[in-house]
Image (cartoon, rainbow, N blue to C red):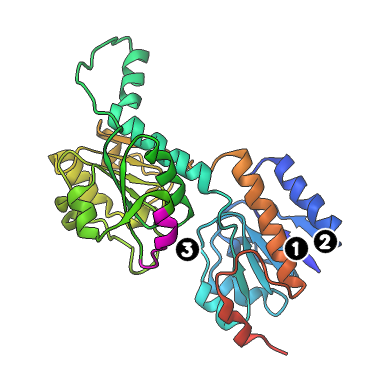
Amino acid sequence: MKIAYTGTQFPVSMQEEMQEFSRGKGYTFDIIQHETRDLWDFRERLKGYDAVISAGEKFASRTMEYLLPELRVISRHGIGTDEIDREFATKNGIAVCNAAGTLSSCVAECALALILNTLHGYAQLDAEVRAGRWGANSEYTGELRGRTVGLLGFGGIARELARFVRAFDCEVLANDPVFDREVAGKLGVNQASLGEICRRSDIISIHVPLMDSTRGMVDMAFLRKMKSTAILINTSRGPVVNEADLYNALAEGVIAGAGLDVFEQEPVDPDNPLLALKNVTLLPHAAARTYEGQQGAGLMACRNAIALLEDRAPESLLNPDYVKYLKG
């Protein structure tokens, strides 16, 4: 059995640890060098592998079709799978899994950092100190303590963030189509409608996957329902937010600020108007960029791939219906 790994943007030591783990289980594990993030561009190098561990590269249907019939598993070194054509994979008997839970802490820490930095304007203050303008910004900022935090989505990352902000005596509201009342009760989180979250929250943090129902869900209509003093945080996926509407809302004072780790287009276009605003904190999709988190995600991706190749249940399977389409 052969496993190909395409996450070459990670540290060599991490790649080698995954390689050593998989080879110790009796598998061929090859690290595939590539020049782009689209697997179609180097599909020939992936031909003949039973599993591909992907680190966010584009995995379109034509790529999967080219890699059949050998390809049986796509294992994500990470969480999001919007770059994988999961419907095609399912209908062609290809299992898709991710490293669910491994990045919850680091992404929640990033969301908390964005909340604090955006509330206090620390990024702007840092720039002013570096420019020799000590105390140039005399505006007072607000504290997180005692605020109401609204969570769009209530998965692992949102739950971890809820734990963090509860330490600041925050009231936490959450909305999720599959809302776990038992977990919410333990964390002191209250279920709320989207309308209630908009009306009551001082901070809204987005933790939903990108799909048809969430694409552009935070638009001007949504933003106008928020408090004018509220801030928006996004560490999920850029296209969940209509960026043009967000810019207008920030520029016109519809909301007070935003903290973004993700964007509609990545890397960000140098002409993106958000870059000119002072009331937005911007990061380069770095929420999951911790060694501990990615190390855990990489090893879980290996375990998932090996389990599926051995016809065992993985730790996280995203398309269980793939078994209906298995051939032979």
Indicate which disc residue 28 carries.
2
Dot 2 lies on which element? strand
Is there CB contact under 8 Å for labels 1 and 2? Answer: yes
Crowding at label 2, few (<14), some or many (≥20) Cα neighbours within 10 Å? some
Q: Residue at x 26, y 11 (%)?
A: 135
Q: Residue at x 38, y 51 (%)?
A: 265
Rendered-image quadrant of the C terminus: bottom right
Residue 297 image position (x, y, % from top left): 63, 51
Res. 1 in view: yes
Q: Label 3 belongs to which residue?
A: 82
Indicate which disc residue 3 carries.
1
Camera-nearest residue between 86 and 231: 231
Q: Earlier in the sequence, mark 2 or mark 3?
A: 2
Res 258 → quadrant:
top left
Q: Residue at x 73, y 73 (%)?
A: 312
Q: Earlier in the sequence, mark 3 or mark 1?
A: 1
Q: Is residue 178 magenta-colored?
A: yes
Crowding at label 1, few (<14), some or many (≥20) Cα neighbours within 10 Å? many
Tell me the distance, in whole angstroms, between the alpha carbons under discs 1 and 2: 6 Å
Residue 213 image position (x, y, % from top left): 33, 68
Give amino acid for label 3.
Answer: Asp
Dot 3 lies on which element? loop
Q: Residue at x 29, y 9 (%)?
A: 134
Image height of 78 relative to 134, above or below: below
Camera-nearest residue between 35 and 320: 320
Tell me the distance, in whole angstroms, between the alpha carbons under discs 3 and 1: 22 Å
Tell me the distance, in whole angstroms, between the alpha carbons under discs 2 and 3: 27 Å
Camera-nearest residue between 285 and 151: 151
Residue 260 image position (x, y, % from top left): 36, 42
Dot 1 lies on which element? strand
Camera-nearest residue between 54 and 317: 317
What span is colored magenta in the figure?
Answer: 177-185
